[in-house]
Amino acid sequence: MDIIIPILILAIPLFMFIFLGLCGMKMSYKLAGTLGTLGMGTVLVLSYLTAFTYFFSGAPEFINAAGERLQYLVFDQTWLAFTEKLVIKLGFLLDPISAMMLVVITTISFMVHLYSMGYMRDHHGVYERGFQRFYAFLSLFTFSMLGLVVAPNIFQMYIFWELVGASSYLLIGFYYTKPSAVSASKKAFIVTRFADLGFLIGILTLSYYTGTFNFTELTSIPVEGMTNVFQVSGNTAEGVRSIFANSAAPVFMGGSVLTWALVLIFMGGMGKSAMMPLHIWLPDAMEGPTPVSALIHAATMVVAGVYLVARLFPLYLMEETSLVIITVVGALTALYAAMVACVQIDIKRVLAFSTISQIAFMMVSLGVARPEFHHGLGYMASMFHLFTHAMFKALLFLGAGALIHAVGSNDYTAMHGLRKHMPITHITFLIGCLAIAGIIPFAGFFSKDEILSSCNEYSWVAYLWMSLVAGMTAFYMFRLYYLIFWWKEHKVHEGHHAPHDQAWTMTLPLVLLAAISCVAGFIPFGNFVTWNGHAYDFMAHFNWSVATVSLVVALVGIGLATVMYRKENELPAKFRRALPTLWTWCYKRFYWDELYIFITHKIIFNCISRPLAWFDRHIIDGTMDAFATLTNKASEAIKPLQSGQIQMYVWYYLIGALAIGAIAVACLI
């Protein structure tokens, strides 16, 4: 493969960030947005060309004679060499999931760039202040995520992982004059820093015992009963498995060093993908512009954790304990987020908790994936759902942005009955709801069904649990749909214009994403992305019994939402009165924020920080002040010795000489 195209995929968004950041304020708003969009469009074309070449060229460096897809290292340059083993390299790695992520990231990012041309200005055509800065930050965010997914080693991934966090901080806090936006950006940054500390410790632990950072070596570890197909030019890390299988390998609190390393690495994924208990930053991230929410939730930050686990999946297969932890955390998070989404009134918060729940779906799918279950069906299902979810979740967020732009509020109580006023937004939003609910033939039906099939293979408990979450997903999404577009007629307040569909820059991305959400499920995804490189025709093994049950569950959820919310009635109020405690806990997000505030303010600040501050001020500073005071007093005491009078110096000399003489005589005696 020509090295120029991969370099340009990374270089163009980086250049656009620097160029727009330095020169954007000197050009018009429209020119800055147009340049940013054209730059992203170029990256989109190059990424599609790269993915198409990888998947369809049939070149021997991409696929071997057995039809197995291989990892291909486009380039790998040494950046920092501390020791012979501790070497940090920067490069570009192509394999099924990185090629797939190139398509996802650039597609959603381009849609967001185009959409923002209309969203970031008011109805009078006046652009928002900082428009050029916004496009510079979008380019930085895209560059960060692209660098993360093509990283050939885990340290490069960590570098771009942190850059993704910095980019999200800048975009969430874009409205820096709003205290709530500043608070949300700091919250996201700080919470993910705690998670990333675990990630870094896990990286260092893993690399210390394996002697490598490279994915091509780490993921070429053969799993018992499976052939080793993840390799580059036949190079494998045959000794790595024996390191952890050795009975002399270090053990901490009953867990092997590999288990601890993988759990700590997953901790980083929990932070980025907003898994419990590190999920609290994501709902508040809605303070950023809505296109930012679409980018964060659909294609970049929150999928980084899923991608991390998928990237190291052969390692996770070696330690089933780590996969069990991933499954449990994902299942609890999925149910929690679905329950909270059922009662929220802010449409962006409903979609935020929906994202948390759907990302947890992907985590559970990875957690239950095993080679003996249809060749690791859960892995393929997770990546498939990542792909389809990116499309319809971006569609839903951008649709929400069109609604907010038209109505001027995030609250569904300011909407109602908008289907007549905004027909294009209505149809596209409905398609997004049908897709995420898992209704055939929309994209979510196929990817969600494969996840449920993998859960069914693993455990009936996991299957029933995730089926319940799937039904709740259909319920809260159609609750949102009916409250926005039906419920009752929309009233246009005096002095306000009637809502209407937005300009083509905002409408075109909705139509394109809706079209993708209609057909993406028919992609033979298993022919392109599997955990071990073997093509897997999931349609040939499609479990129609599971699909039928999941479809019925989704229809029940939609039916319940239809009865309760299609027309104004007393059923929602009756439900709230019947279960007031449950409703309050869900509305208050199970008081997670209050718990964190209690822990930080009452325990950490009052019981730890304040005593440490007192110790620092009174003991540390007091000791230093005492030394200074003693020094000053001593200097005052000996100041007369430097009087400048010669006769006094003679007396001091004489007394000193006599004292020395007396001491000498005493020693001789």
Image (cartoon, helix red, strand yellow):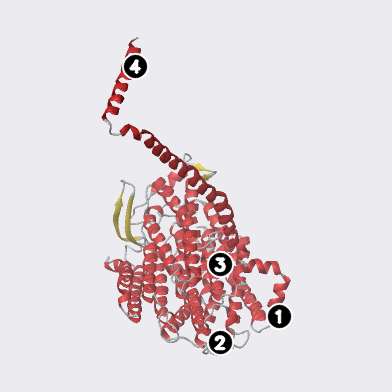
The answer to whether marks 1 and 2 mark residues whose Cβ atoms lie closer than 8 Å is no
Q: Residues within 10 Å of mark 2 (few under 14, many from 20)?
A: some
Q: Secondary structure at mark 4?
A: helix
Q: Nearer the viewer, mark 1 or mark 4?
A: 4
Residue annotated with mark 4: 663
Mark 1 and mark 4 lie on one chain; the one further toward the N terminus is: 1
Q: Nearer the viewer, mark 3 or mark 4?
A: 4
Q: Is residue 29 visible?
A: yes
Q: Is residue 537 visible?
A: no
Q: Residue furthest top?
A: 669
Q: Secondary structure at mark 3?
A: helix
Residue annotated with mark 1: 570
Q: Nearer the viewer, mark 2 or mark 3?
A: 2
Q: Residues within 10 Å of mark 4 (few under 14, many from 20)?
A: few
- From the viewer's side, name the closer residue of 668 and 359: 668
Specify the amino acid type for callout 2. Arg
Q: Residues within 10 Å of mark 1 (few under 14, many from 20)?
A: few
Q: Quadrant of residue 358?
A: bottom right
- From the viewer's side, name the closer residue of 304 and 417: 417
Specify the amino acid type for callout 1. Glu
**Mark carried by residue 419:** 2
Residue 592: horizontal and vertical position, in percent? 59, 61
Residue drawn at x 42%, y 71% as measured from the top left = 104
Q: CA distance from mark 3 to mark 4?
A: 87 Å
Mark 1 and mark 2 lie on one chain; the one further toward the N terminus is: 2
Q: Is residue 113 above or below residue 527?
A: below
Residue annotated with mark 3: 357
